[in-house]
Every structure is written in structure tokens, then in C-alpha cells.
Amino acid sequence: YRVSTGENNSTPVGNFKIINKIIDPVWYTEKAIVPAESPDNVLGSRWMGFNLPGYGIHGTTSPEKIGQQATKGCVRMLNAEVEELYKIIPAGTEVTIVD
């Protein structure tokens, strides 16, 4: 899968576990609560959260940015691909991020 990672290498490296999975996630920012159906919701169609609060694997509303350092630290995927992964990755799965 092609992904986007964090701007300025802000995606943390290490071993993590997926602790929650959400279909059509709401995005909570410091300034707003962005509904799932909003084009401003950067999380796209799926969220798989790590045991590091605020970080995880998610979809996108900006598919043109896949392959770039474009997130605040999460791993971003195309919605169709994150939906495929979501189906086969259970909560508790270990994820290793390397530089």
C-alpha cells in the first residue's frame, strides 16, 4: 500500500498496537468536532487507533496527497485500501513503524 506519513517526519517510529477501530470516524481537533461526512474530515472512512493517543492508521479526503509527508503524524491511506485493511486487521494487531 502507498501511504502518507507525518510532515517533518512527525510519524513516531516504534512498535504499537491497534486498540480501536472505527467506521466513519468523527475527527476531534483542538478547534472543532468534524463530522464523518464532512469533506473537512481528514480521517476518511476508517480509523485504526494505536496505543499512542492521537496516532493511528486512517483513510483520507485528500487522495492526491498519498505518498507525501502530509499528516500530523498518522499513517494515511486511500479509503478503498484502508477499508480492505480494516477488514483483515483485528484490534490487538501489532504495528511496527520504521524510518
Image (cartoon, grey):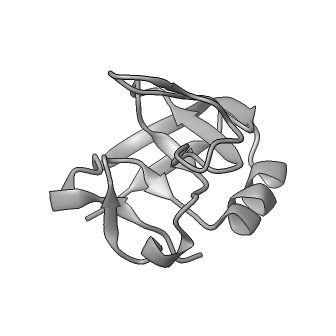
The residue at 29%/50% (across/down) is: 13
- Determine whether, in the image, residue 16 is placed left or right of residue 22: left
Q: Position of residue 33 (x, y in %)?
A: 51, 22
Q: Is residue 95 above or below residue 21?
A: below
Q: In this view, does 18 lie above or below 79?
A: above
Residue 93: quadrant of the picture: top right
Q: Residue furthest right?
A: 87
Q: What is the number of callouts on the image?
A: 0
Q: Which of 41 and 19 is in front in this view?
A: 41
Mark yes or no: residue 11 visible. yes
Q: Which of 50 and 44 is in front in this view?
A: 44
Mark yes or no: residue 91 visible. no
Q: Nearer the viewer, residue 62 or 7?
A: 62
* Viewport quadrant of the N terminus: bottom right
Q: Residue furthest left?
A: 8
Q: Where is residue 58 in the image (x, y as percent from the top left)?
A: 58, 49
The residue at 39%/28% (across/down) is: 52
Q: Position of residue 99 (x, y in %)?
A: 25, 65
Residue 25: quadrant of the picture: top right
Q: Where is residue 54 in the image (x, y as percent from the top left)?
A: 41, 29
- Determine whether, in the image, residue 73 is placed left or right of residue 38: left
Residue 19: quadrant of the picture: top right
Q: Nearer the viewer, residue 98 or 44?
A: 44
Q: Is residue 37 above or below residue 69?
A: above
The residue at 38%/55% (across/down) is: 97
Q: Is residue 49 above or below residue 62?
A: above
The residue at 57%/63% (across/down) is: 77
